Image (cartoon, rainbow, N blue to C red):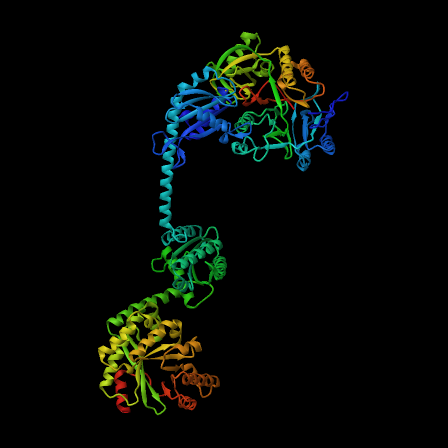
Amino acid sequence: MVIGGEADIQRMLANVMRVCLSRLSQTSVHTFLYWNDENNAACNLGDEHCHKLTRYLSLPIRKNGELWEYSEELEEVFKAHDPKISHGLVKSSRGAYFQYFQIPKQGLLLMESSRVPDLIVKQILLPLLGKLARSCHSCITHEQLIREIDARRIAERRVAHQASHDELTQLFNRRQFSKEVERALKVALREKNYGAVIFIDLNNFKSVNDAMGHHIGDLVLKEVAVRLRDVVRREDRLARFGGDEFVVLMPGLSHDVDTALDRVNTLTQRIHESLANTVHIAGASYTVGCSMGFDLYPRVNVETNLHHASDIIKNADLAMYEAKGKRQKHALAYTPSMSERLNLRLSYISELKDALLNNEFELHYQPQFNQNKQVIGAEGLLRWHNPHRGVESPQVYIPIAEDSDLIIPIGHWVLFEACRHLKELSENTLPPFFEKLSINVSAKQLVHKGFVDDVKHAIDSTGIAPKLLGIELTENTLVSQIDKTTAVINQLNDIGVSCSIDDFGTGYSSLSYLKKLPAAMIKIDRAFVCDINRDAENRSITRMIIGLGENLDMDVLAEGVETIEELYCLAEMGCNKYQGFYFSRPVSLQALIELFSLKA
Amino acid sequence: MAHVYAAKGGFLGSELLMSPRVDRSLTSDRALMNAIDAVIEDGAKSIMVLACSANKHNPYLLNPYLTSLKIPVFGGVFPALFIGAEYLEQGIIVLGFRCELHVECFQYLSEKSLNEDLAYMFFEGESIPGGMLVYTDAFSSAAEHFVNCFYESLGSGIPVIGGGAGSLDWVQRPCLFSNKGMLEDAALVIGLTVNMHTAMSTGWEILDGPYLITDAQDNIVKSIDFDPAFTHYQRTVERIAGVVVDADDFFSVSKNFPLGVVNMDGQVIVRDPVTTEDGELICVGAVPKNSLIYLLSGDPDKLVEAASEAAKKIQIKGDNDAVFVFDCISRMLFLDTQFKRELKGIQENISSDTLIIGALSLGEVANIGSGMVSVLNKTITLGAI
């Protein structure tokens, strides 16, 4: 169909032009084609945006050492040709003869010779122009089709890329990464070698994102992706799992497990070092750091006895989670006990939810006394009769509740239960020096939206006097979000509810923070009370805390008083409020009522 | 251009050229190096080296030397050389130029696409040469393709002469001298800083034809007038000239009866069939399919006369420092003992002050009538500066 069977228009025309040069004894040959400026390509006359003739190809490319592209002679000849006639002859000002032939609807063929061309040249070419035109048309159409196909292919590739890649970092996304792990797992099983999946979670990213905005956060993530790309091996696969989580697949590590572990540790060390370096964005510097966990594969799922890619990723995630919890700098390898702990945790979460539904919680109280052994208050302590495991220590389930956000509904229950109990206590006779009933509140609960309203609602619905209710916050809870906690405590103070700083001395507060906090009481941690009569260091610390309380106009209560010697020592130092086994263990509401009756 | 008049016995040099160093013995590699050193010591800024294939120069010995040279060197190994009317079948000619010439070297011709390399050769920020010399490896399968691509890049308006280097045993080996060493499957292009005017002629005449090349591929003619090419050729020669053509001793006859393609300008482009295989004719140079060809014959007087005419054309254009000649080896093989007449004919028509320096080449390169640079056979090409 096309001359020479060549679909590329440039090659097709070049072949024709070479024949003109050699067989028709021409000095040079030039082709002009109709041109579409929009897509910068030759076009068929009649197509959209197609009406301008442009020099397309010259053979040879020069004359007298100058490129025909810039030739004034050629321009002069082109302008002199008559577009209305099918062929003609122009003599240039330099004395060369240029024969031209219209290529119907496609362009113009211009041939140079040093003398008047023989008639035979015209006789040979004229019958061929129709075929040349058809060839040009076919080639141009073919190229248009190729362009469309290419454009479509590019679009499809883009879609496929988007489906498998994270838009921000251009790393694999979760879905594609899972496929990569599946593939790698099959290879590992076949070739009997080890690979690994490393889970990376950025530290401090949330604070950067919250403080500087998502735009800066995104730039940080992109920088992290770049750094990870730089340190991983060529055969490794990288993905962003979402948020500030990244995963690395390391296939083909070794047939030997120790060597595989070494290689993983080498890479994680490099990752750690790379991400520990400051990130510079928009003139500011940020430090992120990361927590990492990994799992080697193949690893059989003990339940299904099969290998699952999802298990490997999950295990690596779990290991990372533990590493984060332990604030571990080095990557932690997954062990099955982590899954056991996770399963236990998941069981607890389920059981805690049931506990709320089935009313399995109970509030007990540990009374607080003054130096005259008068009851001045009580601290509410959660108790749980877990039908599956019996009576549970709060140290087991409270961290789980805080992690899973169940602490919010649990805390809500404690608040309302304490207010109901306070109501009941008030209806019986409260001891004359009773000041308040305190409940522990977690950081999450404190900053949870509507907490102050909940407190108001609990007070209003039970009709208790607000001053009888107190909340206890650990030192770290208070200073972790100092501005927010200060605002909440102020709001509570405004409605008459006071705040105590629990476990004082164990946290990271500074004197400037303490000055800001509108707390009514400092509770000295039991660690400093224990054997205080024999421990000079504890005495020093306690003395300091008592002094602090005096200066900041806060009451001071010592927790964990277990012996009379401790009591005397504390009293000598000027601390006159106490809580501990010496006085009473935590008791039920009923027992507290009875105690109050006795003391009354 | 002012030049030093030759003293009795030799060209002593000019403003552009130095007196050539000629060794007529079977020159060793060491002797060649010494000759080049001597020319450099005399102040040459570029060097042309022509050597006879009989010297059997060793690239392994020469390459470290050639690559260490600080000035451009170019040239080739040919079956024979000549200087003036003197003909050398062994020895060397080393010619120093007093100016630095631009030498472009193109290697691995048969292995890669040449167009990109050639498209930007010369001219970028440089002045346009007044003429060009081209040396090719005659046995490179891409030599003609190179010449075609070369013209497509160079264009018309710049005179070109050149020739194919190699030896008559038809074995391809390193045959070009360059700053990259002795090369094969390569080409050298030298831009001259002075204007060159050229002339060419063949002297071969049409004996019979035309015939239609009904099938051909590059330099292989497969069928003529729908007959197997060898059969047609054999029959025609036997009919017209009464000479028996034997496939086993093909060249001894075919050298006397080449083919000729007549172009639109009426110029006869000679194509030398050198061997036959499977009923096909293998020529030096491409023979296009569907072209009309003629059977040519040669008369020694006509050939000599053609060479003299070419020399006259050159001389008419004025006094020259030197005339470079590429004369086809097959003319020498045809003329045999009469070849000296050709050389004498050239010398007699060129001023005695002009250096005549040349080589017997395997194929020639020159501009034909339309200006196009082509590979030629059985032709004498002269370029005068």
In the drawing, does residue B35 fall left or right of residue A564? Answer: right
x then y, percent, for residue A220: 43, 58
| Figure quadrant of residue B285 | top right
Question: The N terminus of chain A is located in which quarter?
Answer: top left
Q: In this view, does A265 lie above or below B319?
A: below
Q: In this view, does B301 lie above or below A514?
A: above
The residue sitting at the right extreme is: B8
Q: In this view, does A316 lie above or below A87?
A: below
In the drawing, does residue B245 fall left or right of residue A236? Answer: right
Residue nearer the viewer, A360 or B80: B80
x then y, percent, for residue A309: 37, 55
- Residue A307 appears anywhere in the view: no
Residue nearer the viewer, B243 or A503: A503
Residue nearer the viewer, A347 or A488: A488
x then y, percent, for residue B40: 72, 33
x then y, percent, for residue B86: 71, 19
- Residue B279 appears anywhere in the view: yes
User: Could you tell me how many numbered marks the image carries?
Assistant: 0
